[in-house]
Image (cartoon, rainbow, N blue to C red):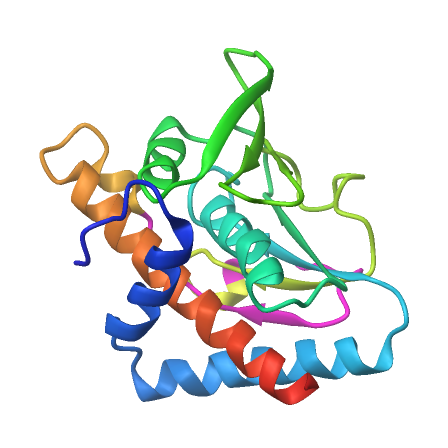
Amino acid sequence: MIAPNHMNPKNFFKNTAKNTLIPSDRKVLLQKIAQKIADEYTTRTTSFGLNFICTHNSRRSQIAQVWTFFAIDYFHLDKILPYSGGTETTAFHKNTVKTLQKTGFLFNLIDFSHKNPNYSISYKNATTTLVGFSKLHDDASNSKPYIAITTCNHADENCPFIPEAIYRFHLPFVDPKSFDNTEFEEKKYQETNQQIASEVFFIFKKVAELTS
């Protein structure tokens, strides 16, 4: 596991991409996702979203949304919008928040709720902010059109049917939830954060190459 940079998402993003080994079969899937994103980017005149979807919209899908938010600026792909959602509403889990804070993301509370607080998410020198909270995948804030990317680590056929999506991909990640309240909690959340960041980097680097 790469030690998190506590102040700089840019360094973490570059370092995790450089030092994380992505298996060849996983790269094939990431390349397919990148190609479809690039196709939409070059043919559309308006913005479209990437909607990362998991059951509770509390951990993996939120991490993917935040790194996509960062990657959009890093690779100058401003027609892409970062979304996430779930099949039910829970909360942006506190361990997810802490993990992203350790890589330099800034969380400011917009609306306090014991059940589902809203955060304004940014980073040093960010030109925009992201509103983070748990929501359904078809929430009004996830405006169409979008490409759906499901992140649950069970079989693809168990993920939700999303008829409004332009395309739908299954990109599973292991849920760090099972390590909550254990001695491995911080390590496992950072491993998930590292994997997602490295794969978002891979996708967006390919998109940038295909659209340049």
Work out whether 185 lies above or below 171.
above
Q: Position of residue 148 (x, y in %)?
A: 65, 62
Q: Position of residue 76 (x, y in %)?
A: 65, 67
Tell me which residue sits at (71%, 72%) in the image.
167
Which range of residues does the magenta coloring cover? 158-175
Tell me which residue sits at (77%, 70%) in the image.
166
- In the displayed orientation, state which residue is furthest to the left: 183
The answer to whether residue 91 of the structure is visible from this angle is: no
Work out whether 171 lies above or below 37.
above
In the depicted view, which residue is nearer to us: 167 or 77?
Answer: 77
Quadrant where the C terminus sits is: bottom right
The answer to whether residue 187 of the structure is visible from this angle is: yes
Q: Position of residue 207 (x, y in %)?
A: 61, 79
User: Horizontal placement of 143 versus 1: left or right?
Assistant: right
Tell me which residue sits at (47%, 33%) in the image.
106
**Quadrant assignment, res 73:** bottom right
Magenta region, mostly helix, strand or loop? loop
Residue 101 is a magenta residue = no
Q: Position of residue 158 (x, y in %)?
A: 51, 59
User: Horizontal placement of 6 versus 170: left or right?
Assistant: left
